[in-house]
Image (cartoon, rainbow, N blue to C red):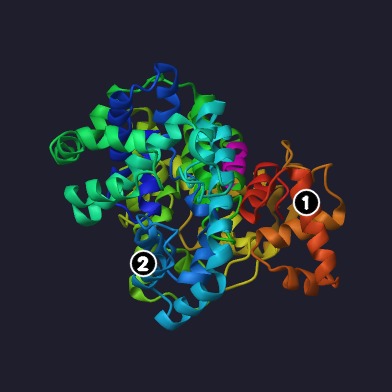
Amino acid sequence: MAALSLATDLANDNPPETTLRICYIALETAGEVGLPSRDIADLYYGALLRFIGCTAYAHEESLVLGDDLAARHSLAGVDVTRPSELLGAAIKGSKGKSKAAVLWNFLTQSGSMFARFTSANCEVACMLGARIGMPDGVLRVLSEVHERWDGRGGPNRLKGDSLSSAGRILHVANAAEIIRQAAGVDAACEVIKERSGGQFDPVVSQAFLRIAPDLLRNLESISVWDEVIKRSPRNESSPGQARLREIAEAFGAFVDLKSIYTGGKSLAVSKLVSRAASLMGLNDVEDIVIASLLADVGMVSVPTNILEKTSKLNVTEWERIRLHTYYTERILSRSPILSNVARIAPWHQERLDGSGYHRGASAGSIPMGARLIAAADVYQSLIARRAYRNAFSPDEAVAILAKEVSSGRLDRVSADAVLEAAGKRQAEGGKSTERGMGEGTGSPSSLLSPREMEVLNLLARGHSNKEIGAELDISHRTVQHHVEHIYNKLAVSTRAAATLYAAQNGILT
């Protein structure tokens, strides 16, 4: 969990170990407040997962503000009840859009933008926390990360003692670290003091300020990694493979939600990999499956407006894409428990002829597990729509995969196993024939009607109600009714949460 929290730092354009420092500050403040021991675990895991919902609104943020990472970083320490400060930070953090466009978007959408952002962020965080197996206390903390002591936060406008004690402490710790990074220790203390009784619980603020000068100044001289690991409230030094897969599935979904074009990708690739690895008779199937779920965890370092760019990437943009495997390696290598996974996942973009990245490795050094993930990743990506192209048909994907094999880029045995796992097998003449898949790929939820399934899939791919209506030849009002029914049936309230539900239940097409 500590290692994977580094991915959430990347997703917010924060320095490495920002989340760990927030966790450490929160635990120290909890000691000063006298937080009961029964609440410490909620605070600890709530802090480590503090940002796991931040990708839920990345697509919408990129449309409004340009570079979602830069915007999120710029807005992180701002008091959202002060429009002028919020606007200034939005303009300062804007990249990829003109300041005039950001100003217009802010003036026309800021009233609802914060509400939609907090709803999506908290809802997805709770869903992913539940997927990991976090208890209700942690989920409550995650649902409160954007609330305020004065009731002017979101999504539920909770106020005062209706907020959990752990949540109130995390609010202070988060702001203190973000402001400390931006402006120093004295500024962090001043902000907490100034917002006490407004954004922050005054009792927690006072407790923090009593220890803040030494606490914040010592952050640069201690190993915050060691301190956080040492204070783990649970003895989970060796979680089982099932537990690791749950965590990997949650963080894979966290990455996939960054773009409307990748919802459910990691889970789909992992299913192909699982079946193909078994067909190949590989011994380390579970490590390879977990590696496939976490292979793109470094992709959260890439702004969504690059991932969703419709034209050719420039050199700088392409370099950011290429670096994602480097970040994946750095994140996974921090955890001894993930050491086997770290030897597989970062290699999935390497190619046998040395044309891949980030190492430019060639056949002899690429693990078999990475070769398999590479083939599954290519096939799954081909049959999905991207910003710059439509989805290829399965037969077209088979033909392209065959070309990659014949050109010496992909491993033939792995590619054949992936096609077998996908229900395809190569036939003469480049065509494919259908075969049984063994394990099912998921069936539509019995909760939804066929029309609602169509609407859900278009909604998950970022289509507006107007666009959905045009696609299905139904009125805007009818679409709105369908969306409301979908949300009610799935017990969600945002596009991101509906997308996550659809991905987890195998109903994204």
Residue at x-position 15% and y-position 35%:
214
Residue 339, horizontal then vertical, whole percent: 35, 32
| SS state under label 1 | helix
Residue 308, horizontal then vertical, whole percent: 52, 68
Residue 262 position by quadrant = bottom right
Q: Which residue is mark 1?
A: 486
Kind of residue sitting beneath label 1: Ile
Structural distance between the alpha carbons of marks 2 and 1: 35 Å
Residue 501, horizontal then vertical, whole percent: 67, 45
Alpha-carbon neighbours of circle 1 within 10 Å: few (<14), some, or many (≥20)? many
Where, quadrant-wise, is the C terminus in this rendering?
Answer: bottom right
Residue 212, horizontal then vertical, whole percent: 21, 37
Residue 474 position by quadrant = bottom right
Range of the magenta residues?
A: 269-276
Give the mark nearest the N terminus, 2 or 1.
Answer: 2
Residue at x-position 44% and y-position 83%:
100
Q: Nearer the viewer, residue 66 or 196?
A: 196
Which residue sits furthest left?
221
| SS state under label 2 | helix
Residue 339 relative to residue 55: left or right? left
Q: Nearer the viewer, residue 186 or 246?
A: 186
Kind of residue sitting beneath label 2: Ala
| Residue 83 seen from this side | yes
Residue 271 drawn in magenta: yes
Residue 340 relative to residue 147: left or right? left
Residue at x-position 74% and y-position 42%:
442
Residue 324 drawn in magenta: no
Q: Check whether the beta carbons of the residues at disc 2 and disc 1 lie within 8 A of each other.
A: no
Indicate which disc residue 89 carries: 2
